[in-house]
Image: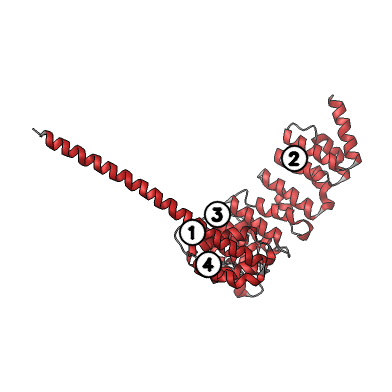
Amino acid sequence: MVGLDVVLGLTIALTSLVMLAGLDMLGGTWRRRRRWHRRRRAEQEVMAAVVDALAVPARLPNAITVMRAADPAVAETVCLAAGRVVAEDDRGVLAALARAADVNRRARVHLRSSRWWRRLRAVRLLHLASDDPADLRVLNDPHPEVRAAALLWLSDRPGQLVRQPDSGRARRSASRDAGGLLAEALVSDAALVRIAAKHVCVKADIAPVWVLEHALEQARRPGAHPLAPVAPLSTVAALGDRVRLPLDDFLYARAAPVRAAAVRAIAATAPDRTAELVRRHVGDAQVVRLAVADIAGRDPAASPVLLDLADDAAWQVRQVARRSLLRSGAVGRALLRRLQQAVV
């Protein structure tokens, strides 16, 4: 039979262990808070030096000294925070400060990390605090957020968006250059990547026509996703008359969203065909009628069709048609008033 002294000794030992664990947790929390406050103070000091250098270029040498002496993690955080708000004219100053703290080199090392969030942070750092060309290898990253961030990085480097290759060698390596990777991103399975790719195309000074051609070719291939053409067609619609491509075959696609995107794209690139598109697709699926109601306001000849769409069975089509009537001028507003009086 276990003696009372043994039981009492075990109880005291367990109580002591619990108390020691609690004290260790409290001590660890205090140490973590102390480190956090120390890092915050360091970030504020470095940020103050960076802001001074951005405001007064003569203080750049002092800011470079501060950045070199700062902890690398603190320098990275400051570069990310400053890069989000700095003006385009001051990007060179921020890039010089990032090079002084060796931020760019560390970020390029982190591009090869196995952790996607480190690669994402590295891409954002290089985008905001580097004037080097975009690393195109990141456009093939397995994580969609990293690929989207890499596309935004590329959007600020328009010189890397080459036109259609001329030589056979360049044509064989088209999937490796910026244009080929951008075309693949436009038909990606990830919506975030498609949105970023569209942003790159729209932001480019010279419309990347061959990129859109390549993306539409991929969307036409057998086995491609039925909705793959939607993003390239939406990009064509956003570029407007800067692009002229043969798109009529998409008007007969089996997927209604593709037909709707084709209607918007053709109306944007060839406004003289608006009336024809409205007449042909006014009785199509709801998403196509929505596109028809949107483009019909650009052509006064389509106002009677808008009057029919303003009484459509689908609520969304009615709302878009009535907004288009309001935008179509005095005739459209008069037709809308007549419709409202008939309803009353």
Question: Which residue position is annotated with label 3?
Answer: 145
Name the residue: 49% across, 67% down: 106
Name the residue: 62% across, 58% down: 84
| Comes first in the chain, label 3 or label 2 | 3
Which element type, helix, strand or loop, lies under badge 3?
helix
Q: Nearer the viewer, mark 4 or mark 2?
A: 4
Q: Is residue 105 above or below residue 32?
A: below
Question: Which residue position is annotated with label 1?
Answer: 118
Locate residue 79, reporting x and y percent.
57, 62
Q: Could you give the CA–CA distance between mark 4 and mark 2, rounded to whole angstroms? A: 52 Å
| Comes first in the chain, label 4 or label 3 | 4
| Comes first in the chain, label 4 or label 2 | 4
Q: Could you give the CA–CA distance between mark 3 and mark 1, rounded to whole angstroms? A: 11 Å
Name the residue: 54% across, 71% down: 65
Q: Could you give the CA–CA distance between mark 4 and mark 3, rounded to whole angstroms? A: 21 Å
| Amino acid marked by disc 1 | Arg
| Comes first in the chain, label 1 or label 4 | 4
Q: Is residue 143 above or below residue 330?
A: below
Mark 3 crowd level (few <14, some 14–19, many ≥20, 10 Å Cα): some
Which element type, helix, strand or loop, lies under badge 1?
helix
Question: Which residue position is annotated with label 4?
Answer: 103
Q: Which mark is residue 81?
A: none
Q: Nearer the viewer, mark 4 or mark 3?
A: 4
- Name the one closer to the observer, 335 or 44: 44
Locate residue 7, reporting x and y percent.
15, 35
Q: Could you give the CA–CA distance between mark 1 and mark 4, rounded to whole angstroms? A: 13 Å
